[in-house]
Amino acid sequence: MTQTATELPQATDYGLRRGILSPMETLAQSVSTMAPTTTPAATIPLVCALAGNATWLAYALATAAVLLVALCIGRYARISASPGSLYTYASLTLPPWLGATVAWSLLLAYVATGSSVIGGFYHYANLLLRDATGHVYSAVLLALLVTGVSIWIAYRDVKISARLMLWIEALSVTVILIVVILLLARQGWHWDRDQLHLRGMTGSGLRLGLVLALFSFVGFESATTLGSEARNPLRAIPRAVIQSAILAGAFFTLCAYAEVLGFHTAGQDLGASQAPMHVLAQVAGSPVLGLLIDIGALISLFAGTLACITAAARVLLLMAHNGLVHGSLRATHALNQTPSRAVVITGIAAVLPVVVLAARGASGLDVYGWLGSLATYGFIVAYALVCVALPRYLRDHGVYRPGAQIIPWLAGAAMLLALLGNLYPMPEGPYGKLPYIYLAYLIAGLLWFWFRGQNKTAQG
């Protein structure tokens, strides 16, 4: 009898602790990788600078696109579960070189997202420290500190890290929702006509804002990296992926509407604000909540760092099992049952560019934007390839139904449009260099894949 993908998780545990995570802890992995608290504080103002009164619409459209991708990933996750996330799904269907493309893209995406949130961490840490002590501290030291703690927790116990991420994000999002509800209540629960009628919106602004809004969602699928550790993974993981897309989309769209409304009331420009949640908290009549949100954003960025290292390490583990990287990275800790070497390597890879940029004087928000945008390329390519491969995957497993190709085609088209939106018009400054960095990295990964294949053929 031929072994199917459904049987794979029962046959292989890769040295990881099986069935240790509850459905809520599995959901926490996806939510924490997105670091949702940072979107109202950092990303929505950037989207507003482009889309203006259509900011809420940009997030609503982004939610629809991400939900299409989530539905595709959910179909895979109901059949197969492993630590390799989207790489596993791609390798079961696509030609080997495209499977390797997904693997290298996904690894870069998680590592670069980790770098991005480390940059955000030292930005918020210094804001809070300056207000508390009157001094700012070394960005390099703060980056190394948050990464070191994250590596230690990810190395020690996946259950501890999942529970910690769950509580951090729950508390942070709750405080933001309190501000939003107070703000809407003070406005008398009426619609903002400027936003409702999309006053001042331009097509190019909405397109660019939509592309940037997608960055808020990247990593929503990272629960799929817990295929060996989630309890009842074929049920818990697809639910976590789809729930994270829906919940995050609703939260981001509501926050986008409320922030634009609050800044209309305050007579300020959201797109130019450096501390939007402070302004909203004042408009809502509770200034102290602005400080709590900044603290929550700082802790959320720590949780995001931890989540990215957790996810990247498991992708790297499976890449080692499949011969894409050195075999020593297959090792797991005998007692902790975590991919210990992969955790250390991905943690170092995440913090290294941040240390270099911080030492050269880059601000935390610049690091957050640059490396987050680089990560977006990896995610979009991985999402698109996995979505377009879904119909064949369903046929191979005997579960294809007429019309099953419609959602994958729509999802793939949405990701293609997002990629084109990132590339045209070509961004200026450092952002214009990111596509070339991604392509150089991907070419290097594929050359390594070819070289390893040639060596295996010669040895065979």
Image (cartoon, rainbow, N blue to C red):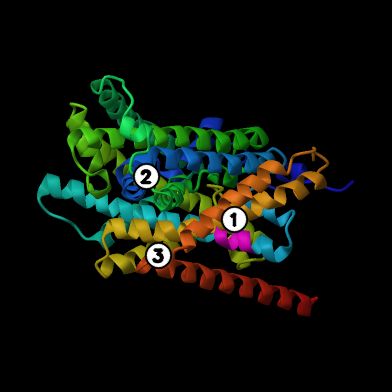
Classify mark 3: helix, strand or loop. Answer: loop
Q: Residue at x 46, y 37 (%)?
A: 60
Please give left or right for residue 449 compared with residue 108 in the image: right
Q: Which amino acid does label 3 sit on?
A: Pro
Q: Is residue 172 above or below residue 450?
A: above
Q: In this view, does 327 lie to the left or right of 179?
A: right
On the picture, is 308 further left or further right than 102?
left
Q: Count all numbered tags in the image, as a single digit.
A: 3
**Viewer can see residue 159:** no
The CA span between labels 2 and 1 is 31 Å
Q: Residues within 10 Å of mark 3 (few under 14, many from 20)?
A: few
Please state the horizontal and vertical placement of residue 252, each as a whole percent of the image. 40, 37
- For marks 2 and 3, the one nearer the N-term is 2
Residue at numbered disc 3: 427
Cα–Cα gap, marks 2 and 3: 20 Å
Residue extending furthest toward the left = 134
Pointer 1 residue: 382
Q: Where is residue 255 in the image (x, y as percent from the top left)?
A: 35, 34
Magenta extent? 101-106
Q: Percent position (x, y) of residue 427?
A: 40, 64
Mark 1 secondary-structure assignment: helix
In magenta stretch: residue 346 = no
